[in-house]
Image (cartoon, helix red, strand yellow):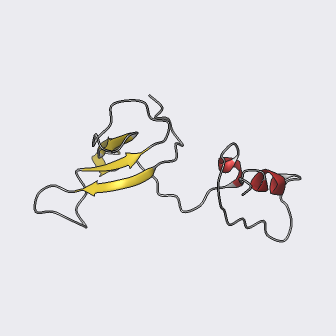
Amino acid sequence: MGLVNGLIGTVLRIIYCANQGPPALPAFVVCMFPDYTGPTFPPKHPNSFPVIPIKCTWTAGHATLSCTGIPDDLAWGLTIHKSQGLTMTKAVIDIGHHEMTAGISFVALSSLKHQ
């Protein structure tokens, strides 16, 4: 349905249980993924999907440990490798003092639409 690891989406809403808010864990987070083709929630937002908390449990020695969290990673930036193949309308590109790999600057700049 278009949901794969590494997918880039947009957070639309963070929904908490009644009478709760931060720092409590949300009941779910509604995210919009452009390539998602499954049922949408809420119906007014096409390509939207609720991401629910997941509980992971593991054993360390004689103790059983667990952690519950939303399986999303916030990204305020992308590597040039992650942006390869994307088409962006604007970007801030920090190449640094020199290219780490020949041609990597071209990859970053060629992702931008011309206006």
Corner quadrant of residue 93? bottom right
Q: Is residue 105 above or below residue 42?
A: below
Residue 58 seen from this side: no
Q: In the image, residue 15 lies at what x, y percent? A: 24, 55
Quick check: 42 left or right of 82?
left
Residue that appears at 38% across and 40% down? 46
Q: Nearer the viewer, residue 67 or 105?
A: 105
Residue 18 seen from this side: yes
- Total number of numbered labels? 0
Q: Is residue 85 above or below residue 101?
A: above
Residue that appears at 52% across and 47% down? 8
Q: Is residue 94 above or below residue 82?
A: below
Quick check: 15 left or right of 114?
left
Residue that appears at 65% across and 56% down? 89
Q: In the image, residue 48 lies at what x, y percent? A: 37, 42
Q: In the image, residue 77 lies at what x, y percent? A: 59, 61
Residue that appears at 29% across and 46% down? 53
Q: For the N terminus, give its image quadrant.
A: top left
Q: Nearer the viewer, residue 19 or 25?
A: 19
Corner quadrant of residue 44? top left
Quick check: 114 left or right of 34?
right
Hey, which residue is sitting farthest bottom in the picture? 97
Q: In the image, residue 71 lies at what x, y percent? A: 39, 47
Hey, which residue is sitting farthest right in the picture? 102
Corner quadrant of residue 49? top left
